[in-house]
Amino acid sequence: MKIGQFENKAAVGPAVTERKSTSAPAGTGAEPSAKVELSSTALMGAGGGDAVFDAEKVKRIADAIRDGKYEIDADAIADKLIANAQELLSPGRKA
C-alpha cells in the first residue's frame, strides 16, 4: 500500500452528472435530460451513522506512520474482519 499526501477531494464541491438521451419525447422537439447532484456527505459514503472526523487523530496516526512508530495489531484487524463478515452474512440482517 502506498502512503503519500492526503487530499480531501470531497471538499471540492458537489459532483454533478448530466445525462442526455438520444431520443426526445414525440412532438416536443427538445432533448430530455437529467441532472443529479451529490452532497459531500454522499460522496464520503456516509451510511447514516454518527461518524465524526477526528483530524487530530488522523494527524497523530500519519505522524506515527511517517516516523516508523505505528504498530499494527493483526489479531485485532482479523477479529474485526471476521465480526463484520458474520454481521453481513447473518440471516436477520436488515438491508
Image (cartoon, grey):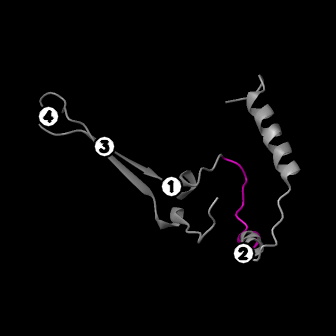
In the foreground, 73 or 91: 73
Residue 72 part of the magenta segment: no
Q: Which residue is under mark 4?
A: 28
Q: Mark 2 and 1 residues: CB-CB less than 8 Å, in contact? A: no
Residue 88: x %, y % from top left: 74, 32
Can you tell which of label 4 and label 1 is closer to the viewer?
1
Q: Which residue is under mark 3?
A: 19
Badge 4 or badge 3: first in the primary sequence:
3
Res 4 → quadrant: bottom right
Q: CA distance from mark 4 to mark 1?
A: 32 Å
Q: CA distance from mark 3 to mark 1?
A: 18 Å
Badge 4 or badge 1: first in the primary sequence:
4
Q: Which residue is under mark 1?
A: 39
Badge 2 or badge 1: first in the primary sequence:
1
Can you tell which of label 4 and label 2 is closer to the viewer?
2
Q: Mark 4 and 1 residues: CB-CB less than 8 Å, in contact? A: no
Report the amino acid beneath label 2: Arg
Report the amino acid beneath label 1: Ser
